[in-house]
Amino acid sequence: MRRPLYRQLVSYYELIEGRDWKSEVGLITSILRGHGSQSLVDLGCGTGYHVRALTKLGFDATGIDISKENIRFARKKAWEERIHPRYVVGSYYEYRHDESFDAALCLNWSIPVRGDEVKRFLDNTYSLLRPGGLLIFDFERVSQIVWTDVGNTIAQSWDQRNKRIVRVSLGQIASDVLYSRDVYIIYPKLLKPMLPNERSRYEAARRSSQVQVYVDSSCVRFFSMSEIRDFARQSGFRVVANFVLPRNKYKRNYAVLKKIN
């Protein structure tokens, strides 16, 4: 796992991700309780927010992530919050467990991009679930691509303690896959009152040894519901629900798949 977002930028991840964490946890909790689920595994758990939140709500939660830095951060946060979920470094293509889970999560568009990898992921998830178990994942719909943002530079910034984080992103779409290049600039907030705008701060960043600059690349696949139903069917699942939460001018879609007995 070489991406800076999952290594050097781990401590900023939950800030810059921009999720409505509370609403998302509320939706997931409602689905899990409605199905009588108690045990769950978060596949690609990142820094472990969902696992921590669901543990506090009484679920028996396990988090899996391929990034050692993510898992190290997740364990530290759980220790600080005095809770005891399980976190494991591992691949969601290969992870095994002695007992079956009631449900699985895969969030932050962490499902694979290539068709053969989607099937491999779903096949392994099937093996982790009890009969009738649920898989909940979020995804982007092809019909909801915001074409006015594609190919244009988007700049965002956040403050965390004595740091300011700036991200400049540029994305392109090919074959329903968004390829994004993100430049992250992290510098002391003391630069903020001295410099009038992002351009001047960027120029200062290039000259300052106190400023960190990272380049991160990612890709996210856009799906149609018919594609998701086909993938589900091939791996022994069926789609039982689809939910949508707003995300500024975008939308975050959630599919709920049920393991067929």
Image (cartoon, grey):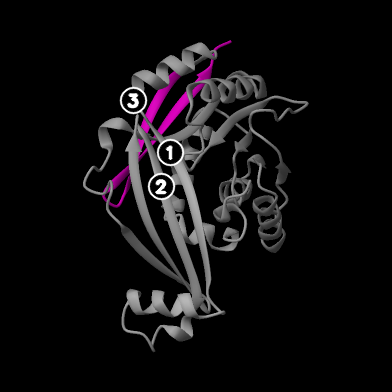
Above-or-below relation of 201 to 78: below
Residue 224 disc label: 3
Which residues are the magenta region? 239-261
Task: Name the residue furthest left.
Answer: 148
Sequence order check: which comes first, mark 2 or mark 1? Answer: 2
The Cα atoms of the two marked residues, 1 and 3, are separated by: 13 Å
Circle 1 is placed at which residue position? Answer: 220
Circle 2 packing at 10 Å, graded few (<14), some (14-19), many (20+), is some
**Residue in front for this viewpoint, 115 or 106:** 115
Q: In the rendered view of the protein, which quadrant contains the C terminus?
A: top right
Q: Can residue 90 be seen in this snapshot?
A: yes
Majority secondary structure of the magenta segment?
strand
Q: Where is residue 242? Give x, y as percent.
A: 37, 29
Describe residue 123's horizontal placement relative to residue 229 as left or right.
right
Circle 2 is placed at which residue position? Answer: 180
Kind of residue sitting beneath label 1: Val
Q: Quadrant of residue 239?
A: top left
